[in-house]
Image: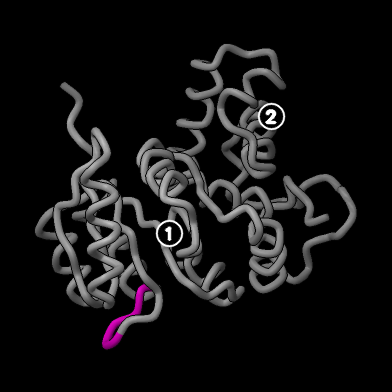
């Protein structure tokens, strides 16, 4: 039997945590293993329980969600823990702040219950997750702030140490990941088997030191493999 996806809930509102707990525990293959009311407690419980996925609020007392995310993703004891940042605020500073902190996903709290459950499963499976209505604006804002000299028109990728060890095929696949394609879509686009596409993406994780697909997306933009429209 496959082990359940272990989830840690982090939110300073009791009713929010109760709702998430009831929803997730009712789903087969998902188990809530802890609850935290602020970022400091979230980090402590993450080390104690080693969850697969953390659902992290942003605005909390003491230690906020972005700082807690940064601490969790930087902790060598928690290499496989994925963080989904949840907030009621659709503000750029939170969105790309979450990516900078190492979050694997970003969702608004008005997400439908089914979409939240699917988000937990996707992130656990290594997929990047961004709320659709903020994805394009997120990437534009992130790249503009992190690399203001990125060209607006399509151009050959500038020299970048992160690309030095990638084969031409791996660069091609990184660009497709940056455009939001899944492994299955990449396989169809390049006429590869799904397993081959997955293998290439796994090598990108290793070569680029990326925790998850969200970091591959950002790298594709920062290195110029994908241009901001």
Question: Which residue is label 2 attached to?
Answer: 168
Mark 1 neighbour class, 10 Å CA radius: few under 14, some 14 to 19, many 20 or more: many
Q: Position of residue 45 (x, y in %)?
A: 14, 64
Q: Which structural element holds mark 2? A: helix
Q: Quadrant of the N terminus?
A: top left
Residue shown at 29% from the left, 71% from the top: 11
| In the image: residue 2, left or right of residue 89 | left
Depth check: give the residue in front, 9 or 53: 9
- In this view of the protein, can residue 42 be seen by the observer? yes
Depth check: give the residue in front, 141 or 113: 113
Give the vertical position of 198 relative to 83 (above or below).
above
Question: Which residue is label 1 attached to?
Answer: 103
Residue reaching furthest to the bottom: 62
Q: Quadrant of the C terminus?
A: bottom right
Depth check: give the residue in front, 31 or 19: 19
Asked if the residue at tag 1 contacts the one at tag 2, i.e. Cβ–Cβ closer than 8 Å, the answer is no
Give the vertical position of 105 relative to 186 (above or below).
below
Specify start and end residues of the magenta stretch as a single range.
Answer: 61-65
Q: Position of residue 114 (x, y in %)?
A: 43, 44
Residue reaching furthest to the right: 153
Q: Indicate which disc, 2 or 1, sits on the residue closer to the N terminus.
A: 1
């Amino acid at each position: 039997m496959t082990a359940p996806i272990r989830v840690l809930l982090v939110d300073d509102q009791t009713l929010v945590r109760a709702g998430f707990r009831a929803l997730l525990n009712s789903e087969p293959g998902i188990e809530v293993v802890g609850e935290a009311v602020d970022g400091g407690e979230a980090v402590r419980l993450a080390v104690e329980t080693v969850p697969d996925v953390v659902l992290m609020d942003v605005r909390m007392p003491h230690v906020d969600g972005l700082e807690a995310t940064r601490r969790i993703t930087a902790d060598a004891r928690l290499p496989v823990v994925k963080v989904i940042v949840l907030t009621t605020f659709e503000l750029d500073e939170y969105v790309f702040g979450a990516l900078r902190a190492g979050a694997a996903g970003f969702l608004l709290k008005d997400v439908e219950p089914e979409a939240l459950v699917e988000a937990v499963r996707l992130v656990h499976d290594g997929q990047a997750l961004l709320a659709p209505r903020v994805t394009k604006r997120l990437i534009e804002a992130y790249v503009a702030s992190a690399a203001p000299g990125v060209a607006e028109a399509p151009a050959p990728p500038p020299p970048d140490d992160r690309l030095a060890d990638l084969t031409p095929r791996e660069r091609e696949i990184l660009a497709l990941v940056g455009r939001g394609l899944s492994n299955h879509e990449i396989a169809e686009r390049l006429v590869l088997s799904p397993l081959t596409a997955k293998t290439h993406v796994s090598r990108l994780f290793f070569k680029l030191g990326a925790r998850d697909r969200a970091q591959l997306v950002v790298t594709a933009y920062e290195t110029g493999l994908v241009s901001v429209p």
